[in-house]
Image (spheres, rainbow, N blue to C red):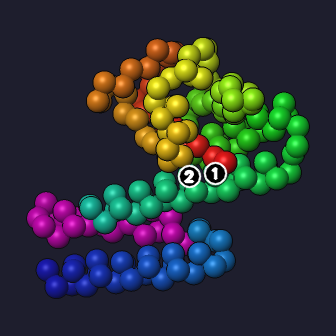
């Protein structure tokens, strides 16, 4: 047990050091789940701890991917000035970095919310009037909505399949 707990503690320290370095170098290759995961070789508490650690590492990687997507989105915003060219390029960058299969980019123009780009959606009708999207914009906070939980309903189908979750990320 002591050897396995030492491995867990050592791997946590390694991840902490790699993350601290990556913050300054912007090189996150040493912090991917494959290089930091622990072997889960038992069904006891140590195995459960290793499994929880691996889930944490995967969640950190997903968080970093979303952050990188938002950074890429900002870079696209800074590099282009025409909204017709900006919208699709920015949306493509976000979808690519987050692994999302579908999405839409909405902007506020003259106090009206309108869709400027979409990918993988059969229709974007109703997005501009959706209460969940408007609430996220109003509070200025990213919201992840689980479809079916808490009464969230999706009217449109994504790529012919029902959506499982929706991420609304307001950007100024």
> Which dot marks residue 69?
1
User: How far, Cα to Cα, is label 1 from label 2?
Assistant: 5 Å
Say which residue label 2 marks. Answer: 66
Query: How packed is label 2: few (under 14 Cα within 10 Å), some, or many (20 or more)?
Result: some
Vertical position of residue 134 compared to residue 127: above or below: below
Residues at marks 1 and 2 touching, judged by CB atoms closer than 8 Å: yes
Where on the picture, by quarter, is residue 122?
top right
Residue 38 belongs to magenta span: yes
Q: Which residue sits at x=54%, y=59%?
A: 64
Q: Mark 2: which secondary structure?
A: helix
Secondary element type, mark 1: helix
Number of numbered discs visible in the structure rendering: 2
Q: Residue 133 in the image: state x and y as whole percent.
A: 51, 31
Q: Nearer the viewer, residue 77 or 60?
A: 77
Please name the residue shown 64% across and 71% down the image: 27
Q: Which residues are the magenta region? A: 30-50
Looking at the image, residue 107 sits to the left or right of residue 63; the answer is right
Q: Is residue 150 visible?
A: yes
Taking depth in this image into account, of 91 and 17 the one nearest to the observer is: 91
* Residue 129 occupies quadrant: top right
Left or right of residue 87, residue 81 in this image = right
């Amino acid at each position: 047990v002591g050897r396995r707990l030492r491995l867990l503690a050592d791997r946590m320290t390694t991840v902490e050091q790699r993350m601290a370095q990556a913050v300054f170098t912007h090189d996150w290759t040493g912090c991917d789940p494959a290089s930091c995961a622990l072997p889960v070789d038992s069904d006891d508490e140590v195995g459960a701890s290793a499994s929880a650690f691996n889930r944490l590492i995967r969640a950190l990687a997903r968080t970093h991917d979303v952050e990188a997507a938002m950074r890429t989105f900002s870079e696209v915003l800074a590099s282009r000035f025409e909204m017709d060219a900006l919208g699709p390029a920015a949306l493509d960058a976000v979808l690519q970095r987050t692994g999302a299969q579908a999405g839409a980019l909405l902007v506020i123009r003259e106090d009206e919310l309108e869709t400027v780009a979409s990918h993988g959606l059969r229709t974007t009708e109703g997005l501009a009037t959706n209460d969940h999207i408007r609430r996220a914009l109003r509070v200025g906070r990213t919201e992840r909505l689980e479809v079916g939980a808490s009464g969230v309903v999706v009217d449109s189908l994504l790529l012919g399949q029902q959506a499982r979750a929706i991420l609304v990320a307001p950007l100024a």
